[in-house]
Image: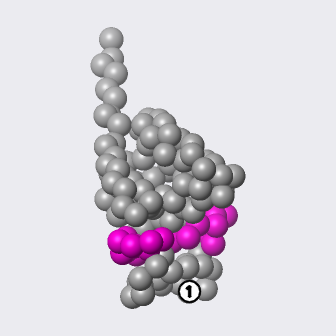
Amino acid sequence: MSEKRTRPAPPLSVSTSDGTTVVTLYGEIDLVTAIRPASGLDALSSGPGPDLVLDLRPVSFIDCAGLSVLCRTRNRVRARRGRLRLVTEDGGFLQVLRAAGLGGVFEVGTHLPPPGPNGSAPGREPVPSGPGMPSSRPM
């Protein structure tokens, strides 16, 4: 009989400051592991006007199941008149977004927003964009 191995769900950490919730995701987000971040993000996007920042810098891999989690969260946040931002320094992730037809759909930055009301302090660096890359808006 073959031994069935499963990977543990990637951990996530949550912190809140001035009404903005920062969720840091870790490891691989794929068909096997996406349920944990999905249920956590569902809970965090259930109230009115959620302001979520997803820190994807520690994510080493994301597949279509992971992208589905991001899209579901975006749709839930928008339906509740909130804001969703992604943080990544990985150009490969931006290529995956573009290839999936999601270029420009998400608000993407390379750094966490500074503490303060709505992360409105100046000095954020947008994700570099080029021909065919998703547009980025400052955090």
Q: Nearer the viewer, residue 12 or 100?
A: 12
The magenta segment: 100-119
Examine the rendering and report whether any part of residue 64 can be seen: no
Q: Position of residue 66 (x, y in %)?
A: 50, 48
**Magenta stretch, overall SS:** loop
Residue 118 or residue 38, whichever sits in front:
118
Which of the 4 image quarters holds residue 17? bottom left
Picture coordinates of residue 114, whole percent (x, y):
36, 75
Residue for point 34% across, 46% down: 12
Q: x, y (%) of residue 59?
A: 36, 56
Count neighbours of disc 1 (C-alpha within 10 A) and say few if under 14, some if 14 to 19, many if 20 or more.
Answer: few
Answer left or right for 79 relative to 139. Answer: right
Q: Viewer-proximal residue, 23 or 97?
A: 23
Measuring from the top left, give residue 24's x and y in whole percent: 35, 55
Is residue 4 in the magenta section? Answer: no
Q: Which residue is mark 1?
A: 130
138 relative to 30, above or below: below
